[in-house]
């Protein structure tokens, strides 16, 4: 009887990132959007139970800076369609959010904090073991647009909002150029 190769199981809730990277392992998942409670707090309610977050993670070892010891890296991809509140009409607007990030692992939080300002890459600590699900949620939250808007709102704007938007547009065209005074001063010399 042929034996099966051993399978390695990694827990995304407490990821052993060093072993994950050394194994060149992959994890992927598909979870209800509602399970990401901090992200859900920023969404237009109610959340459709069919909405999902799809993600995958891959670990690898890369040579350290200046030829140092290899370091653990994580490539994370996630995407979801989320209901946000359009800031123009206040109706829900389905918005795609995408994450495609690389993270380098360092020994602990203190090391990550010390190297953060000088590092071009994003850093995560090996200890305490990170929750991959929390990292995914953090990255999705940071991927949310600051001002979600419909390209074209599906319903007319309320009278107050339409009047304000039209007033801002008209005021913008009447606003003097910020360097107009400078041009006048330059013309005097």
Image: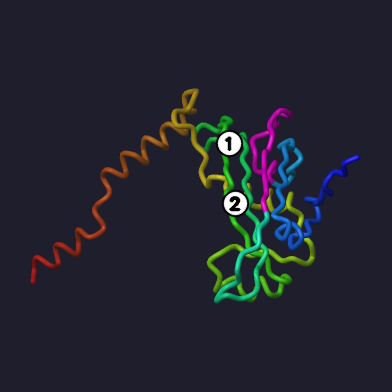
Mark 1 or mark 2: which comes first in sequence?
1
Closer-to-camera residue (118/178): 118
List the residue tagged with mark 2. 142
Q: Residue at x 62, y 53 (%)?
A: 75
Q: Residue at x 43, y 31 (%)?
A: 162
When the figure is inspected, residue 107 is found, relative to residue 103, above or below; the finding is below
* Quarter of the figure with the N terminus: top right
- Local crowd at mark 1 within 10 Å, few (<14), some, or many (≥20)? many
In magenta stretch: residue 21: no
| Labelled disc at residue 36 | none
Q: Which residue lies furthest to the right in this view?
A: 1
Q: Residue furthest front?
A: 1
Measure the C-alpha gap from mark 1 to mark 2: 16 Å
Answer with left or right where residue 156 lies relative to residue 70: left
Image location (x, y in percent) of residue 146: 53, 47
The kind of secondary structure element at disc 2 is: helix
The span shown in magenta is 39-58
* Quarter of the figure with the C terminus: bottom left
Image location (x, y in percent) of residue 34: 74, 37
When the figure is inspected, residue 19 is found, relative to residue 112, above or below; the finding is above
Image location (x, y in percent) of residue 137: 69, 48
């Amino acid at each position: 009887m042929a034996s099966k190769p051993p399978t390695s199981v990694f827990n995304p809730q407490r990821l052993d990132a060093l072993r994950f990277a050394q194994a060149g392992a992959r994890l992927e998942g598909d979870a209800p959007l509602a399970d990401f409670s901090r992200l859900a707090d920023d969404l237009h309610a109610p959340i459709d139970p069919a909405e999902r977050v799809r993600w995958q993670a891959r670990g690898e070892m890369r040579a350290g800076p200046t030829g140092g010891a290899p370091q653990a890296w994580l490539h994370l991809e996630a995407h979801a369609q989320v209901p946000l509140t359009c800031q123009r009409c206040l109706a829900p607007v389905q918005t795609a959010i995408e994450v495609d990030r690389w993270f380098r692992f360092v020994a602990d939080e203190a090391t990550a904090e010390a190297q953060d300002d000088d590092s071009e890459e994003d850093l995560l600590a090996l200890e305490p073991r990170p929750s991959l699900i929390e990292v995914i949620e953090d990255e999705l939250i940071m991927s949310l647009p600051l001002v979600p808007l419909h390209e074209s709102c599906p319903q007319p704007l309320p009278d107050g909002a339409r009047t304000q938007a039209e007033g801002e547009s008209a005021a913008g065209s009447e606003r003097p150029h910020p360097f107009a005074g400078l041009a006048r001063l330059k013309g005097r010399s």
